Amino acid sequence: MMQQRKSKTILIYFFLLLSVGSINNINVNGLKLQSIQNINIIGLDFSDKKILLNKIENFNLNNIFLISKSDLIDEIESNSLVERYFIFKRYPSSIDINIKKTKFLAKINKNGKIFYLGSNGKLIKNDLSNSQLPFIFGNPEIIDFFNIKEIVDKSKISYSDIKNLYFYPSKRWDLELRDSTIIKLPSDNINLALNLAIEFLNNERFKDKIIDARIQNQIILND
C-alpha cells in the first residue's frame, strides 16, 4: 500500500511539473512575440539622444530577450559625453537607459582642433562655447591633468579661479589665475609648493603677479 501511495504521489508531481512547464513555455513564447516598443534615454539633450537612439535602433529590436546587452554597452561607452549609465530592461517591450553626462573641466588644443576635456577622461568635440573653463597649454597626458586638478581641489584656492594651465615637457605646471597672477610650480612636491605659494597670494603685502615656487621651500616674487 505504501509503495502504491508513493507511486501515485510521484505521478502527481510529474504531471504538475509538466503543467507548470507548459504554462511557462506559453508565457515565454508569448513574450517572444513582443518587439521592443520603447527606448527611453534619460540624461542627454535632444540632439545627442537622437544620435544614440538611431544607433541603437540598428540592433535587433524584434525581441527584448535577444537584444545584446554588450552591444548596448559598447554603443553607450563609445559616446564621449557619457560619464556613467544604467540599463534597465522593462519586460516585455521597453528599455530604459539612464545616463549621467560628463562634466566639462577644461579646453585643450589637439592637432589644431579645440576639445573639451571631460570628467570621464575623454576628449570631446563640441560646438558649445564656454569661456569660463580654463585652457590647457602644452601637451600633457590626461592623467597629468587629473593629478594637478586633484592637488588644486585639495588646496585653498578654487579650481574656478584658474584661467589657464601651462604644461611643460619637464612635467611641471604653471597656473594662471583670473586676476592674471601666475604660480610657477615644481615637478615634485607640488602640493607643498602650491600651499606655500597660496600663503603669499593671500598676504596683502605681496601684490606680485608671478609667484615662483619651483625651488623647494622657497618663494621668489616677481612683478
Image (tube, grey):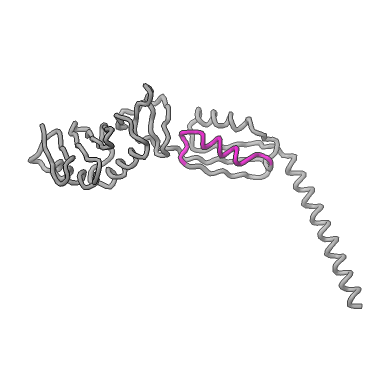
Q: Position of residue 172 (x, y in %)?
A: 26, 37
Say which quarter of the image contains residue 8.
bottom right
Q: In this view, does 179 lie above or below 17?
A: above
In the image, taking residue 3 as reference, residue 188 lies left or right, namely left
The front one of 121 and 189 is 189
In the image, taking residue 115 as reference, residue 88 lies left or right, namely right
Residue 96 among magenta residues = no
- Considering every residue shown, the one lying at the far bottom of the view is 1
In the image, taking residue 121 as reference, residue 214 lies left or right, namely left
- Considering every residue shown, the one lying at the far front of the view is 170
Say which quarter of the image contains residue 151.
top left
Q: Residue at x 63, y 44 (%)?
A: 90
The quadrant of the image that shows the C terminus is: top left
- Considering every residue shown, the one lying at the far left of the view is 205
Q: Which residue is drawn at 64% across and 33% down?
A: 59
Q: Where is residue 33 in the image (x, y as percent from the top left)?
A: 75, 39
The quadrant of the image that shows the N terminus is: bottom right
The front one of 159 and 170 is 170
**Can the viewer see residue 185?**
yes
**Can the viewer see residue 167?**
no
Say which quarter of the image contains residue 185.
top left
Q: Which residue is drawn at 89% across and 73% down?
A: 5
Q: Position of residue 62 (x, y in %)?
A: 70, 35
Q: Which residue is drawn at 10% across and 41% down?
A: 204
Q: Position of residue 103 (x, y in %)?
A: 40, 37
Residues rendered magenta in the picture? 66-83
In the image, taking residue 18 as reference, residue 38 lies left or right, namely left
Badge count? 0
